[in-house]
Amino acid sequence: MSFDNLCKLLSEKYPANFAHWILGTPQTTVKVLKTELSIEPIRADYLTFLQLQQRILHLEFQTKLESTPPLPLRMLDYWVRLYRLYRLPVTQVVVLLLPPAPETVIETSFNMETTRHEYRVIRMWEENPEIFLNDEALLPLAPLAATKQPQILLQQVVERVNQLSVEKRGEISAYTQILAGLKYKKDLIRQLFREGMMRESVIYQEILSEGEKRGEQRGREAEGRTLIFRQLTRRVGELPQDVRQRIETLSLPQLENLGEALLDFQGMGDLQVWLEGIGD
């Protein structure tokens, strides 16, 4: 999935949140419109049309300014088509995810003789990160916001991701790591998200703290297994009897390794592959 297309997905999944950010006022009624426009139909992969109360909001996500046809002409073309179709005022906003090369002129209008058409450009690297840190729908964009200490900002993002509900954490974490890849090295992203997940992991904390307190190998293994079973059931669903029996045979170090590995499991197949790897 491209970075631009991920932003489109987020804006269509959380349209009210994006409209609130762009326009600065809460939006109670927001409808996602189709991206195909009539008159020699065109379809754009990285834009979102939102119908608000008596207004259309057109969001265009870009990692770079270069395009064919040029971005200003495209924005004029979209405006004409949208107005022709809906007969409503159209607010157009280009969300530029990365800064262009030095000395690059960021155009905000189309100009040709007597025709002038303006649109707004949001430069993500100038945006206040607090806006994104405080809204789970916008959180994946937070790593791209303004900061003089990028690694500290990324650490704050990780902490915020780990505060989300279990149901949303995996999805938002994946989106955030993808967009963070535009700005940060992949090794740093993996390290910080791994450390953050481990610090927040109930399994990891309880196995260590309870095990150290009791100091009994058998007790630690039993408690670790109980926690593992509980977390695995939440992660991959009800465990088959043969899988439960296989986990019953794991040593404490293997249980702790499983407690870390299951953070990446997406389904029962991942667990079975991991268990097979133990025997290799």
Image (cartoon, rainbow, N blue to C red):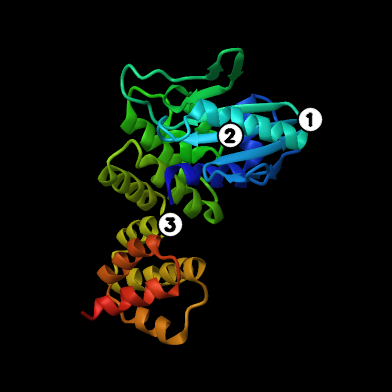
| 17 displayed left or right of 163 | right
Mark 3 falls on what kind of element? helix
Q: Nearer the viewer, residue 117 or 215?
A: 117
In the rendered structure, find residue 54 and report the number of the disc placed on it: 1
Tell me the distance, in whole angstroms, between the alpha carbons under discs 3 and 2.
Answer: 39 Å
Q: Nearer the viewer, residue 81 or 252?
A: 81
In the rendered structure, find residue 59 and report the number of the disc placed on it: 2
Tell me the distance, in whole angstroms, between the alpha carbons under discs 1 and 2.
Answer: 17 Å
Residue under the point 32% across and 58% down = 208
**Image quarter hosting the C terminus:** bottom left
> Badge 3 local density, few (<14 within 10 Å), some, or many (20+)?
some
Q: Which residue is mark 3?
A: 202
Query: Which numbered disc, 3 or 2, marks the residue closer to the eye?
Result: 2
Tell me the distance, in whole angstroms, between the alpha carbons under discs 3 and 1.
Answer: 48 Å
| 51 displayed left or right of 265 | right
Residue under the point 31% across and 82% down = 249
Mark 2 falls on what kind of element? strand
- Tell me the amino acid under the disc marked 1: Gln
Q: Is residue 28 visible?
A: no
- Of the numbered discs 1 and 2, the one sitting upstream in the chain is 1
- Tell me the amino acid under the disc marked 3: Val
| 218 displayed left or right of 4 | left
- Of the numbered discs 3 and 1, the one sitting upstream in the chain is 1
Residue 155 appears at what percent x and percent y? 36, 37
Residue 93 appears at what percent x and percent y? 57, 28
Say above or below: 228 vs 248: above
> Badge 2 local density, few (<14 within 10 Å), some, or many (20+)?
many
